[in-house]
Image: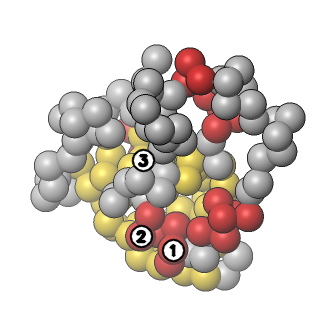
Amino acid sequence: MGRAELEFRVYVDVNGRGVDFTLDTGSDVTIITETTSRDLRLELTKPSRYLVGADSTPLNVVGESVVELNNKGLIVSSLTSIIKNATRNLLGIVEIRSLNLLAIVNSIRPSREAFDPIKYSKYYLKVSVPCLMCIKSY
């Protein structure tokens, strides 16, 4: 099981244009790559938030932009952060809930064959109790 198979991805319209996002239920904010920001011709303002990654490493926030997110007619306004060298767009938990996308994450049930914890244990931190939320970076 590769990293991409562990991700939940969805297309959401941003200011009327479809954008590929990874659903990131562990993030409080929505992040857009510099490339996506340029493609959407977003007007950036000075960052108002200090952000860190899952490993507590500071993120290089280039700017922010208020965007309109649309999922099948459900529209929300979102203050998004544009991150230097980000490799993918991440939809944070607030927007996931607001756009009614949490059901996607909750509905996925991997089969025993699709997910064998022993076979894929190298993707998880070594802990005394199995912890599926403790994915290590590699």
The residues bearing labels 3 and 2 have C-alpha atoms spaced at a distance of: 15 Å
Image spot of residue 48 (x, y percent): 13, 58
Identify the mark nearer the N-term, 3 or 1: 3
Callout 2: 10 Å neighbours few (<14), some, many (20+)? some
- The answer to whether residue 99 is seen in the rendering is yes
Callout 3: 10 Å neighbours few (<14), some, many (20+)? many
Q: Secondary structure at mark 1?
A: helix
In depth, the one of 99 and 81 nearer the eye is 99
Q: What residue is pinned by disc 2? A: 94
Q: Secondary structure at mark 2?
A: helix
Q: Is residue 117 left or right of residue 81?
A: right
Amino acid type at mark 2 = Val
Task: State the image quarter where residue 54 is shown.
Answer: top left
Identify the mark nearer the N-term, 3 or 2: 3
Q: What residue is shown at x 50% (from left), y 78% (from top)?
A: 98
- The answer to whether residue 44 is seen in the rendering is no
Amino acid type at mark 3 = Ile
Q: What residue is pinned by disc 3? A: 32
Assess whether mark 1 and mark 2 are in contact (beta carbons under 8 angstroms).
yes
Image spot of residue 137 (x, y percent): 43, 24
Q: Is residue 69 left or right of residue 103?
A: left
Amino acid type at mark 1 = Arg
